[in-house]
Amino acid sequence: MSTTRAVARNTLFLSLAQGIRIVLGFVLILYIANVYGPVWQGKFSILLAFLNIFMVLGSFGMPRLITRQVARAFALGNQYFWAGLVAQGITTLGFMLVMVAVVALMPYPADTRAMLWLAVLALPLFTLYSVSGALLRAHERMQFLVYAEVLSAVAQLVVAITLLSAGFGVMALAIIRISGIGLAALTVFASAAALRYIGRPLLDLPFAWRLLRESFDFFGMAAFDAILQRMDVLILSVVAGEAATGIYDAAFQLIKVLMTLVLSFTDAVYPALSRLYVQARDRFALVTSKALQYGLILLLPVAVGITLLAPDVIALLYRKPGYGASGRVLGVLGWVLVAYFVQILLTRTLMAGDRPRRAFAITAVMVATGALTLLALSAWMGAAGTALALLFNYLLGAYLSWRACRPYRLTLHPTSLLRPASAAAGMALVLIAVSGRPLWFSVPLGGLLYGGLALLLRVFDHGDMQVLRALLRRS
């Protein structure tokens, strides 16, 4: 299978896995928002933020290291699995204690703290999920992640509706996440074992210790990346309260769906880039450059459309009073999506290209800068200020990552951006002219306009069209 087809196939499976989880999770969030209001949604977003951060901290960068190494030498998969399970199990136990202590220091209501303490039990389950999933990613068997995410998302939705309707209170939110992560972990482990990627247990403590040392650079980058992605919620919840956090999260959840697709794409590219950097440096640069170009072509019109249609989207989905300000937040977050894509793809490029320390340094700068800007703008402007600070931070990260990738000689010609930008501008002018129309009319119209203008302006060159036609034929 060619690199292009492999990336497309893996992107599809990872997008399905994450997309199903996000869509069903979004249904749950809409249920919470429209029944319980912004405060409860704020509590749930705080729960997700803590778990996302501490699951990544507990993994200690191990999954990305295992994926890279096993993708280069499949025969070592079983050894990496058991050593990774031991090493990550140790770090997870440590960060469980850290999470308990951090929650005790936060100025949250008593029910929110109790919910977070219970949620700590999800961390060891995530250890099994992440190490098993690393093997599946290394072998590019992403479809099994789809199965796990489908089962997990459906289970969470059923448990949520059952417990919340029975009046279990906010503690039910923690139980929802624990059950979902546990089911996903068992499914992924069983899949990897059935494929014989996992064999008899190996207790190799020196190798586990070596993994801990080698994963330190990956840990630093992954930890800062996790903090970067969720410190917006944590800072806003402290300086502005749970209701403001719920207003911000109402907009962010919509962008999160698209961020998930972006992350699926970059995760699909990562194993291929890891191999190409060792086997074919010229193709390594070409694949990265084309991935960057295609992503920007697709995301520019999305950002423009979100900016113009944000108030209508919020009004359609959130009927409970108090969500009006979410429209302004969503308009800004649409552009965060573009900057996030550039930053995350180039970060994966640096990792695949044996420069994880440079990726770590950039992410550390973003965390330090982001903490200051988020504190200042969130305290001054509330949820809207949080969105503006996030945009500034990802633009900074995209710029620094691009500069760090210069040794790879990536190519992104100005015309490859000017043409899609012109097509997006033309789409925007028409949407402004027909403003006030319902979304079922505006969204398809915008898509058709951009597609037509992209063909007219030759956004895709001859080589790009050959690749697209080949992918369509294979599909």
Image (cartoon, rainbow, N blue to C red):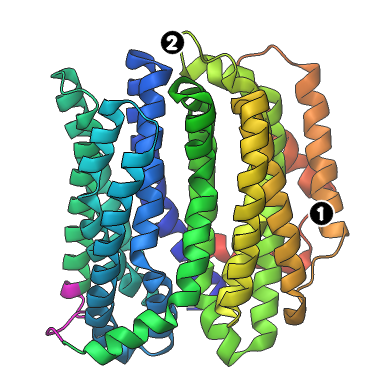
As drawn, which residue projects farthest toward the front? 105
Q: Identify which residue is drawn at 16% across, 73% down.
A: 194
Q: Identify which residue is drawn at 16% across, 87% down.
A: 202
Q: How far is mark 2 from mark 1, CA to CA?
A: 40 Å
Which span is picked out in magenta?
193-202
- What kind of element bears circle 2? loop
Residue 320, disc: 2
Task: Determine whether label 2 and label 1 are within 8 Å by CB.
Answer: no
Q: Is residue 142 magenta?
A: no
- Label 1 sits on residue: 417
Dominant SS type (magenta):
loop
Would you say 337 lies left or right of 304 here? left
Q: Nearer the viewer, mark 2 or mark 1?
A: 2
- What kind of element bears circle 1? helix
Q: Is residue 343 above or below residue 373?
A: below
Q: Is residue 392 above or below residue 407?
A: above
Within 10 Å of disc 2 (Cα), the crowding (few <14, some 14-19, many 20+) is some
457 or 79: nearer the viewer: 79
Would you say 63 lies left or right of 428 here? left
User: As shown in the figure, which amino acid type bears the numbered disc 2?
Assistant: Lys
Within 10 Å of disc 1 (Cα), the crowding (few <14, some 14-19, many 20+) is some
Q: Position of residue 328 (x, y in %)?
A: 65, 23
Q: Position of residue 431 (x, y in %)?
A: 75, 24
Q: Identify which residue is drawn at 63% across, 68% down.
A: 361
Residue 243, disc: none
Q: Is residue 195 magenta?
A: yes
Q: Identify which residue is drawn at 45% across, 11% down.
A: 319
Q: Is residue 53 above or below residue 362?
A: above
Q: Position of residue 326 (x, y in %)?
A: 57, 22
Can the viewer see residue 37? yes
User: As shown in the figure, which amino acid type bears the numbered disc 1?
Assistant: Leu
